[in-house]
Image: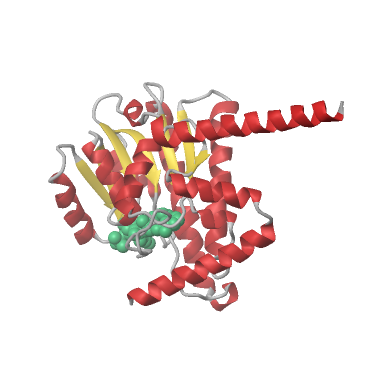
Amino acid sequence: MLYSLVFLVGATIITAQAFRFSGFLWFYLLKPSSVKKYLHGIAPYVLVTGATDGIGKAAARELFVRDFNLIIHGRNEEKVKRVIEELKAQGSGDIQYFIADAAKGGHDFSQLLQPFMDLNITLVVNNVGGVHMNGKKMDASSEADLVELVTWNDLFPLLLTRALLPKLRSTSQRGPVLVQFVGSQSAILGPPTLAVYAATKAFLSTLVRGLDNEEHLWGASSNVEFEHLAVGSVSSAGNPLTVTLAAPSAASFGKALVDRLGCGRRHYAPWMVHAIMEWVVGVLPESVVDRFGASAIRNVYEDHQKRI
Ligand SMILES: NC(=O)c1ccc[n+]([C@@H]2O[C@H](COP(=O)([O-])OP(=O)(O)OC[C@H]3O[C@@H](n4cnc5c(N)ncnc54)[C@H](OP(=O)(O)O)[C@@H]3O)[C@@H](O)[C@H]2O)c1
């Protein structure tokens, strides 16, 4: 009797894990991209924030060559114009832009977005954000620096999305509309010296879940979906790491981001190795994860030092 019970429990666990593993392989290796479902209506546009470098630029490029028109955001008009020229050499769509310092408050978002309100925006990639890797503990940062960090990572994408939502809802009557928020796996690690940054990214994860529920479970349901991307290390202008399997180049990551968007999951890691890392973090004891997070951050600082 006991043997049968152990066998039954063991077989159930193994079957569940095998099922989960095959789902994982399907998702990362075989599942066709859903990006084309956002190519609906006349001249579909994607709005990408922080699109002049790193992940944002790579995602914008990838979407542009897959027939989306672009609205790109940056903070330096000369650089934005240079990037537009670069992109235009690789596709034939329209590219518009707006300028705003995302780390500063006080923007009038309706005015910023006004020029694009007649465009058919079917995708929004809230990518802008980041952290200045200065190795400081929280209380060594000034109050102004902390407010900027929260504005950069949370308030800017929040208020931009707030201003866009009514328009996105009406576009979604014709076909699906997706709003992505680029998160960070630091949110599940809480590494030393990045406590506030990690918390700003955890905010985005909770925001996505709530907004998605608001859109589908409260009042008239719309066809606007929300996604939170769990991003591990990516070698970019802001984080110039040595490229490895665990820290892909921004170009490879941008392609993975576009291949997976609209996959039907609300929270996922676009990069397969990051997904494995997130799974490992979920099964290990918190104290082990904390030590791992602290040592991973130390390695990042050392990698940055070598490059100076
Ligand atoms: N790279 C990583 O390892 C990593 C890991 C986890 C999460 N992420 C997240 O991924 C996103 C992109 O990171 P990334 O590494 O690709 O960054 P990046 O290489 O530094 O590029 C950031 C982009 O945002 C723009 N930007 C930065 N600060 C801005 C501001 N205050 N106002 C307006 N635009 C601003 C930059 O403009 P300029 O070209 O003018 O500088 C650039 O276009 C961020 O949300 C970050 O938190 C990155």
- Residue 283 position within the rendered picture, expressed as x and y whole percent measured from the top left: 65, 48
Residue farthest to the left, as pictured: 89
Q: How many marks?
A: 0
Q: In which quadrant is the N terminus drawn? A: top right
Vertical position of residue 7 compared to residue 250: above or below: above
Residue 248 in sight here: yes
* Residue 5 located left or right of residue 32: right
> Hey, which quadrant is residue 75 in on the image?
bottom left
* Residue 190 located left or right of residue 170: right
Vertical position of residue 114 compared to residue 18: above or below: below
Residue farthest to the front, as pictured: 3
Taking depth in this image into account, of 76 and 105 the one nearest to the observer is 76
Residue farthest to the top, as pictured: 174
Task: Give the residue drawn at x 40%, y 71%.
Answer: 303
Vertical position of residue 207 compared to residue 50: above or below: above
Q: Colour mode?
A: secondary structure
> Hey, which quadrant is residue 259 in on the image?
top left
Q: In which quadrant is the C terminus drawn? A: bottom left
- Residue 163 position within the rendered picture, expressed as x and y whole percent measured from the top left: 43, 42
Ligand 1 - quadrant of the structure image: bottom left
- Residue 161 position within the rendered picture, expressed as x and y whole percent measured from the top left: 44, 43
Vertical position of residue 204 compared to residue 130: above or below: above
Residue 191 in sight here: no
Taking depth in this image into account, of 264 and 18 the one nearest to the observer is 18
* Residue 143 located left or right of residue 59: right
- Residue 205 position within the rendered picture, expressed as x and y whole percent measured from the top left: 55, 46
Task: Give the residue drawn at x 57%, y 63%.
Answer: 293
